């Protein structure tokens, strides 16, 4: 008897959560790989990205993110830092569950070592592309590639993440 009540409650609550998946709000997080291929610094490292945003429709979304660059080093040079990103996504649905999109925005970054970047903090541009697939209800998976300007460095950010739409 108790088990059937528990199962019924879970089914009802999960149905309500899936119904909320059309509000446009989303949050997510995942693993980010950062790569720098410069003469003075050639390395890559994994770190994290956490983001939240609002999807107006299948075509336009706005997103804010916080990322950590990890520890990049090469020779005598090293680089680590963080970035707060704000971007717009122009997307195109492919069927009911897949969406591809382009990314353009700005990011405010801070570096722990200004010898490589030329300064310790600044604001620069970012651009890229990505794809996401809705798995079930509001839960989905995303893969994206973004190019960041970080002072004097060109950084490539590849992110694999999961998101939840409300």
Image (spheres, rainbow, N blue to C red):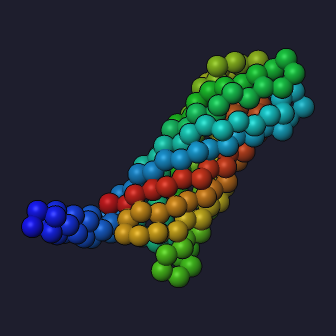
Side of 159 where 54 appears, left or right: left
Q: What is the x, y in percent for residue 26?
A: 39, 56
Spot occupied by residue 114 in the image (x, y as percentages of width and height): 71, 19
Q: Relative to residue 123, is residue 139 drawn left or right?
A: left
Q: Considering the image in quadrants, where does the C terminus appear?
A: bottom left
> Quick check: can you spot residue 104?
no
- Image-quadrant location for residue 78: top right
The relative height of residue 142 versus residue 87 in the rendered view (above or below) is below
* Residue at 65 percent of width and 60 percent of height: 129
Q: Nearer the viewer, residue 31 or 78?
A: 31
Between 158 and 54, the residue placed more toward the observer is 158
Name the image quarter holding the N terminus: bottom left
Residue at 77%, 31% (x, y): give it. 152
In the rendered image, the residue lying farthest to the left is 1
- Nearer to us in this view, 4 or 28: 4
Most extreme residue toward the front is 1
- Residue at image coords 16%, 64%: 3
Q: Is residue 102 left or right of residue 39?
A: left
x and y, in percent, of residue 27 in the image? 41, 51
Q: Residue furthest bottom?
A: 95
Q: How many marks?
A: 0
Dividing the picture into quadrants, the one containing residue 49 is top right
| Residue 75 visible at all | yes
The quarter holding residue 102 reads: bottom right
Residue 162: x and y in percent read 49, 55
């Amino acid at each position: 008897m108790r088990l059937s009540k528990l199962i019924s409650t879970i089914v009802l609550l999960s149905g309500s959560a899936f119904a909320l998946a059309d509000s446009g709000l989303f949050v997510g997080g995942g693993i980010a790989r950062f790569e720098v291929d410069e003469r003075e610094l050639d390395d890559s490292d994994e770190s994290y990205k956490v983001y939240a945003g609002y999807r107006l429709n299948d075509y336009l979304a706005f997103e804010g993110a916080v990322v950590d660059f990890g520890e990049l080093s090469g020779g005598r040079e090293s680089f680590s830092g963080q970035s707060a990103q704000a971007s717009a996504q122009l997307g195109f649905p492919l069927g009911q569950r897949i969406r591809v999109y382009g990314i353009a925005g700005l990011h405010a970054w801070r570096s722990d070592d200004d010898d490589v970047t030329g300064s310790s903090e600044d604001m620069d541009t970012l651009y890229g592309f990505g794809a996401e697939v809705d798995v079930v209800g509001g839960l989905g998976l995303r893969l994206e590639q973004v190019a960041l300007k970080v002072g004097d460095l060109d950084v490539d950010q590849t992110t694999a993440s999961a998101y939840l739409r409300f």
